Amino acid sequence: MAASRSSKARVERRGPGRPRNGDTKGCPHCGHGTIEFNERSRIDGAGVPAWTCDNPACSVPYDLVRAQPADLTSQDLVRSSKQVRAGAIRTAMKSRARADRGARRVARSEHTLRKPKS
């Protein structure tokens, strides 16, 4: 049996200069606090990568790494959900077809083995 994907060692694909969760440095905005990087900072209800300053008097309490993701409308969410579901159904169909082909192959080989020789 093949090893599952989760049991394989994870390979770090990030660049060496990319920040990691928990990295800190001095705040460039206030100069007194330190900023900490978090990949999932909760800003305006969304988890986005950002540097957050620990000084409450800082004029810029957080600095986004990228622009915030566009707000998705309910239609976009429904479309995305349908695509995910369709992908899952396709995967299940492929898996079922593979299992059926395997079962047919086994049945044919068993039939060939049981066939009396003339």
Image (cartoon, helix red, strand yellow):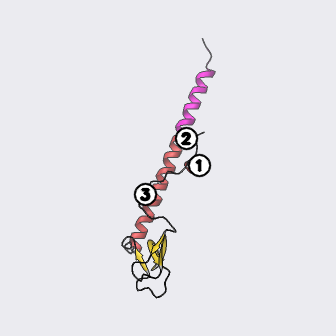
Residue highlighted by disc 2: 99
Number of the label disc, if any, that sits on residue 7: 1
User: What element does badge 2 sit on?
Assistant: helix
Which amino acid lies under the numbered mark 3 shown in the image of this protein? Pro
Residue 84 place in picture, x, y as percent: 46, 60
Badge 2, how many Cα within 10 Å: few under 14, some, many 20+?
Answer: few
Mark-to-mark CA distance, 2 and 3: 43 Å
41 left or right of 115? Answer: left
Residues drawn in magenta:
100-118
Which amino acid lies under the numbered mark 2 shown in the image of this protein? Ala
Residue highlighted by disc 3: 16
Q: In this rendering, is residue 44 above or below 101?
A: below
Whether tag 1 and tag 3 are in contact, CB under 8 A, the answer is no
Q: Which residue is drawn at 52% across and 69% down?
A: 22
Closer to the chain start, of discs 2 and 1, is: 1
Main SS class of the magenta portion in the image? helix
